[in-house]
């Protein structure tokens, strides 16, 4: 992952590097998630800040509708996989 970030921002990224970075940023920022209302004001404000940053990056990208949908699907799957991992760890 670190190499994908380095190539994306400092060198000659591959399409895979760019996709990995965008999916990671979308997942990290929670761009496609909703913060529960009972999370508390500070958590809501923090999460909205993360989403706003990703939204700014996303706004400057030139992507087809198909590419956007693919990115969203990959980000949602990454988040779901992480959630399943956390649930498994708390059960065991």
Image: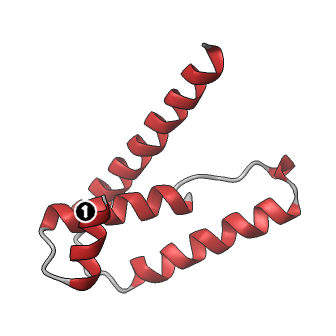
Q: Nearer the viewer, residue 68 or 12?
A: 12
Residue 80: image x %, image y %?
A: 47, 37
Residue 72 seen in this snapshot = yes
Residue 86 in the figure: left or right of residue 40: left
Local SS, label 1: helix
Q: Residue at x 31, y 63 (%)?
A: 2
48 lies above or below 28 = below
83 lies above or below 66 = above
The quarter of the image holding the C terminus is top right
Residue 65 seen in this snapshot = no
Q: Residue at x 14, y 67 (%)?
A: 15
Q: Nearer the viewer, residue 66 or 40?
A: 40
Residue 46: image x %, image y %?
A: 73, 68
Local packing at callout 1 (Cα closer than 10 Å; few below 14, some 14-19, many 20+) is some
Q: Nearer the viewer, residue 18 or 68?
A: 18
Residue at the spot of label 1? 19
Give the total of numbered labels: 1
Residue 36: image x %, image y %?
A: 76, 48
Residue 47 in the figure: left or right of residue 37: left
Q: Residue at x 86, y 47 (%)?
A: 38
8 lies above or below 47 = below
The image's colour scheme reads secondary structure
Q: Residue at x 32, y 65 (%)?
A: 21
The quarter of the image holding the N terminus is bottom left
Residue 46 in the figure: left or right of residue 85: right
Residue 89 in the figure: left or right of residue 58: right
Residue 37: image x %, image y %?
A: 82, 51
87 lies above or below 56 = above
Q: Could you say which quadrant of the image residue 58 lies in?
A: bottom left
Q: Could you say which quadrant of the image residue 63 lies in?
A: bottom left
């Amino acid at each position: 992952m670190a190499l994908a970030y380095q190539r994306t921002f400092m060198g000659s990224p591959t399409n895979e590097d760019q996709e990995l970075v965008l999916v990671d940023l979308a997942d990290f920022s929670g761009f496609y998630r909703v913060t529960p209302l009972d999370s508390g004001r500070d958590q809501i404000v923090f999460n909205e800040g993360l989403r706003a940053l990703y939204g700014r990056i996303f706004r400057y990208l030139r992507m087809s509708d198909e590419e956007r949908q693919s990115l969203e699907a990959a980000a949602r799957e990454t988040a779901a996989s992480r959630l399943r991992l956390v649930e498994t760890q708390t059960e065991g």
